[in-house]
Image (spheres, helix red, strand yellow):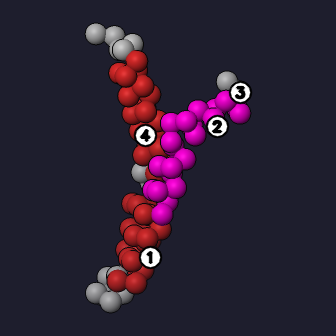
Amino acid sequence: MNLKNFFAELKRRNVYKVAIAYGVVAWLLIQVATQVFPLIEIPPGAVVGFALVVKLPFHGACQHWGCVARLTEKQLSGNMAK
């Protein structure tokens, strides 16, 4: 597969939009955690753990969105195997 075609396919399936939205929400959650956790006396290591828990599913979310877009296209075109 050509790299140019690969990125065009990602754009067509809106994977870029999902990645940006996930990044913004993850950033916002981490910012809130860094401000709130010290106020309620949660140890500083918990912020790092929280950041990892928020960041780790990023790849899965993008991959899932690409699969959902592909399945939706097949369902709309009537090419689903029954």
What whole-number distance in Å separates the C-alpha atoms at marks 2 and 1?
A: 30 Å
Q: Alpha-carbon neighbours of circle 3 within 10 Å: few (<14), some, or many (≥20)?
A: few
The magenta segment is 3-24
Q: Secondary structure at mark 3?
A: loop
Does label 1 or label 4 sit earlier along the sequence? 1
Answer with left or right where residue 36 lies relative to residue 8.
left
Does label 3 or label 1 sit earlier along the sequence? 3
Location of mark 4 (residue): 65
What whole-number distance in Å separates the C-alpha atoms at marks 3 and 2?
A: 9 Å
Q: Toward the viewer: 31 or 18?
A: 18
Q: Toward the viewer: 75 or 50?
A: 75
Q: Name which quarter of the figure residue 22 lies in.
A: bottom left
Closer to viewer: mark 1 or mark 4: 4
Q: Position of residue 16 (x, y in %)?
A: 55, 47
Which circle marks residue 2 in the picture? 3
Q: Name which quarter of the figure residue 32 lies in.
A: bottom left
Q: Quadrant of the C terminus?
A: top left
